[in-house]
């Protein structure tokens, strides 16, 4: 049973811009990205997924699938000289989209952490600073950095679970 139109409009308003940025990283034009996002929203409207299933993660998976479908469809069409030069292998495109999706989901999860936890995790796990270097940079004791990383990782796992990321 389709969702209420006001609910769909709210979903588009809340998630449309982020979905367009995600799609734009994998397609050639803003128009294609907008078409993909609109199709994803239409699917949400038609299928009305369970709200507990992680709507944002569902939307990103739907956009990803639509991008892969679009590239596969282009690969099946007769090729011209210009399209041969600009064609993408579907497996490479799917991998690129997966990498982009991973990055977007991780950024979203990190933004759900407290500033202190995020700073500690980024310093130690992404910038590869030692705990002592991170402590000096953040202006806190070494034990505080260790504690923030420990509790930050727990919070990050919870945020990823909320986003529907499977281990």
Image (cartoon, rainbow, N blue to C red):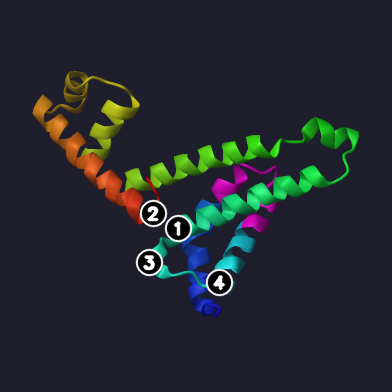
Q: CA distance from mark 3 to mark 2?
A: 10 Å
Which numbered disc, 3 or 2, marks the residue that appears first in the sequence? Answer: 3
Labelled pair 1, 2 in contact (Cβ < 8 Å): yes
Q: Is residue 52 magenta?
A: no
Which numbered disc, 4 or 1, marks the residue that appears first in the sequence? Answer: 4
The image position of residue 95, as x and y in percent, is 58, 37
- Dot 1: few (<14), some (14–19), or many (≥20) neighbours within 10 Å? some
Q: Which residue is mark 1?
A: 56
Q: CA distance from mark 1 to mark 2?
A: 7 Å
Q: CA distance from mark 1 to mark 3?
A: 11 Å
Q: Can you say whether 62 is above or below 46 in the image? A: above
* Secondary structure category for the residue under label 4: helix
Residue range of the region highlighted in magenta in the rendering: 20-36
Q: Which residue is mark 4?
A: 47
* Secondary structure category for the residue under label 3: helix
Q: Look at 90% across and 37% down and name the residue there.
A: 80
Q: Which mark is residue 52?
A: 3
């Amino acid at each position: 049973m389709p969702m209420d139109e006001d609910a769909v409009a709210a979903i588009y308003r809340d998630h449309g811009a982020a979905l367009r940025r995600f799609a734009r990283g994998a397609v050639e034009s803003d128009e294609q990205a907008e078409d993909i996002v609109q199709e994803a929203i239409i699917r949400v409207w038609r299928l009305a997924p369970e709200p507990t299933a992680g709507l944002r993660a569902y939307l990103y998976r739907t956009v990803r699938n639509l991008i892969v479908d679009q590239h596969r469809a282009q690969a099946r069409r007769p090729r011209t000289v210009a399209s041969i030069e600009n064609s993408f292998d579907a497996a490479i495109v799917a991998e690129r989209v997966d990498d982009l999706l991973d990055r977007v989901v991780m950024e979203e999860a990190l933004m759900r952490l407290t500033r202190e936890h995020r700073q500690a995790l980024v310093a130690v796990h992404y910038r590869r600073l030692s705990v002592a270097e991170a402590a000096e940079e953040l202006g806190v004791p070494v034990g505080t950095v260790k504690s923030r990383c420990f509790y930050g990782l727990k919070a990050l796992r919870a945020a990823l679970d909320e986003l529907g990321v499977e281990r």
